Image (cartoon, grey):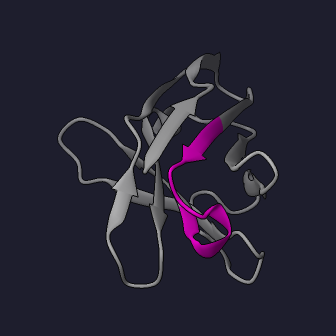
Amino acid sequence: VQLVESGGGLVQSGGSLRLSCAASGFTFSSYQMSWYRQTPGKEREFVAAMTTDGGLLNYANSAKGRFTITTDNAKNTVYLEMNNLKPEDTGVYYCSARRGLGQIYWGQGTQVTVSS
């Protein structure tokens, strides 16, 4: 299983970014795909999740109304569209994949920095 995130960067407060996570090595359609983020000194926190059949869709309260998670099953890719970014959204964003209650796989992360 391999997950490769991209799309992070530096953006001003109020701006937008679109993160991508390219997945390989597993049957994409059988997994729940999620985004998490982490800042130094803090635990990794949940941002958004969805099953690739669209049956589950969930967001952290901090992400509701501003972030959108989508998947492109043909490309085995999950996206996180982030709008109206705030400085507190700064962190390393990780993509994860999990099938049922099985092992969780993680990508290497992509840095998002929001300046005030």
Q: Tell me if I can see residue 61 in this picture.
A: no
Which sits in the foreground, 26 or 68? 26
When the figure is inspected, residue 79 is found, relative to residue 109, above or below; the finding is below
Q: Is residue 31 left or right of residue 39?
A: right
Residue at far left of view: 41
Q: Residue at x 35, y 78 (%)?
A: 102
| First to last magenta residue range | 20-33
Q: Where on the picture, by quarter, is residue 52?
A: bottom right
- Give the residue at x 37% y 35%: 108
Query: Viewer-proximal residue, 59 or 32?
Result: 32
Please tell me which residue lies in front, 26 or 12: 26
Q: Is residue 25 magenta?
A: yes
Front-most of 50 and 24?
Answer: 24
Residue 15 image point, x, y percent: 74, 26
* Quarter containing the C terminus: top right
Residue 110 belongs to magenta span? no
Residue at 58% x, 62% y: name it. 48
Q: Using residue 115 as the reference point, say whether residue 80 is left or right of it.
A: right
Left or right: 110 in relation to 59: left
Q: Does any portion of residue 74 appear in the rendered image?
A: yes
**Residue visible at 75% across and 56% down?**
71
Whole-percent x, y for residue 74 in the image: 82, 51
Q: Does 109 sit above or below residue 2?
A: above
Number of numbered discs = 0
In the rendered image, residue 106, in percent from the top left (x then y), is placed at 37, 50
